[in-house]
Amino acid sequence: MSKEITSRTGGDYSKWYNDIVSKAGLAENSPVRGCMVIKPHGFAIWEKMRDQLDKMFKDTGHVNAYFPLFIPKSFLSKEAAHVEGFAKECAVVTHYRLKKDPNGSGVIVDPDAKLEEELIVRPTSETIIWDTYRGWIKSYRDLPLLINQWANVVRWEMRTRPFLRTAEFLWQEGHTAHSTSQEAIAEAEQMLEVYADFAEKFMAMPVIRGRKTANERFAGAVDTYCIESLMQDGKALQAGTSHFLGQNFAKAFDVKFLTKENKEEYVWATSWGVSTRLIGALIMTHSDDDGLVLPPKLAPIQVVIVPIPKPTPEIAEAAEKIMKALKAKGISVKYDKDDQKRPGFKFAEYEMIGVPVRIGIGARDLAAGKVEVARRDTKEKMSVALEDIDDYIKKLLKDIQSNLFERAKKYREEHTTKVDDFDTFKQVLDGKGGFILAHWDGTTETEEKIKELTKATIRCIPLDSKLEKGTCVLTGKPSTQRVLFARAY
């Protein structure tokens, strides 16, 4: 297969990214502008992510449900900030039938099939879910209500890129209801930690846990928490969000409950979600000019066995023993017995799709009781005794997972800069890029002005940020702590 990929460091990072998506067989453009076809390898990675996150959600007491794709247009107008935040991205269904074009051979929308009320293709599900919750919640005994949904959503984006920003994407969205604000805030914080745990322990992607500014909050939220990651081109990527919604949606949809004291009160809410954008984050955190690099915990195939130069009964027998031993340790493994491709071609192919470990077996290896093991992250090759192969591979996969995290963490540390004046702020942004920790005077006006001048946004106010007296990097006005700036996807 062709290994020609645009250099990651050669200046066209966007083309490098698109090359990885295409050549690693993750996705392709669809006939619908702005949408993508997720190919089997890309979807297998999403399934690994989905299954692990689903387990983590259930371990914290959540259950899955499903709500309609279509939302009555009137629902969006019930929460003012929410409709304002999503109005420009909504796809609207106005008719329910087509008919043959009397003036041609095609079809047209039947003007007699206009809907009584137009429907929105869900950009997010708060409105329809909270309308449903009104019938589910009557008493404190019905709370907390901890629901998650795996679904697709549509946000009509004009500028799209596979996984990172598409008109339709896959995601999960949690929607919970609580009897007190303290319980709802604790839920939002807990789910942020679930996301951060997943990002760091499974994606091997270090993240900054933080709170969004008022200007960057989710539409309709009282508070938005986020995890922010740094990609290899020095730009930030928001990898997950968790929102404390207060009583905004409960009031908009009249969702009340009777307290233990027999008083009627509005419930308190959260919502939280991550999407197939995580695959984009995975690509840009770890991959290189030879293709995709996957952390072992999310790799659909963790180990591939390649016969050298071609399959023989003796090699097949040895491969079978290795596979049996590896599978017994919970390791996913494939034996490539295709005799139409040369080993070199196969090596490049498995490098491209990001298989963490490759085992090469030839007649000489068998005679010596050894195999060649290559790791995808460092390209290092080792000769390993057959009798020790299962324990060796198990440890090696752990080492690769750890190395990818530490490598990404080191990059982030080297590209996080404290800045105290605006000239240096711009120099860092235009130079090495990355995260900038700088003082801000707390006003939306200054936040917007910095964005206008530099295209950098406040990614978050880090949760571990210490109070520190200073002056705003732009206005010179007093500031109490540094916030995290970056250019972002």
Image (cartoon, helix red, strand yellow):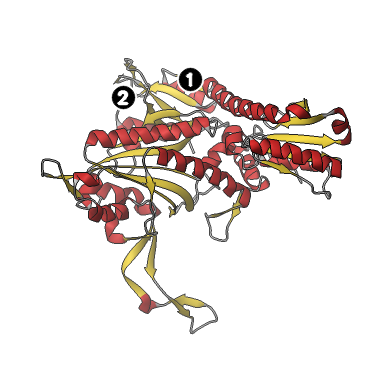
The answer, for residue 369, to whether it is visible in the render is yes
> Viewer-proximal residue, 88 or 347?
347
Residue to which mark 2 is pinned: 441
- Which residue does the image show at 37% across and 56% down from the upper left? 67
Residue to which mark 1 is pinned: 417
Q: Position of residue 346 (x, y in %)?
A: 77, 42
> Viewer-proximal residue, 293 or 472?
293
| Secondary structure type for disc 1 | strand
- Name the mark on residue 380: none
- Which residue does the image show at 53% across and 82% down from the upper left? 104
Neighbourhood count class around disc 1 (C-alpha, 10 Å): few under 14, some 14–19, many 20 upward: many
Amino acid type, residue under disc 2 in the picture: Asp
The answer, for residue 4, to whether it is visible in the render is no
Q: Position of residue 147 (x, y in %)?
A: 35, 47
Q: Is residue 303 left or right of residue 106?
A: right
Q: Position of residue 364 (x, y in %)?
A: 89, 32
Q: Residue 295: which quarter of the image?
A: top right
Amino acid type, residue under disc 1 in the picture: Thr
Q: Residue furthest left?
A: 262
Q: Is residue 100 left or right of residue 45?
A: left
The answer to whether 106 is drawn above or below residue 188 in the figure is: below
Neighbourhood count class around disc 2 (C-alpha, 10 Å): few under 14, some 14–19, many 20 upward: many
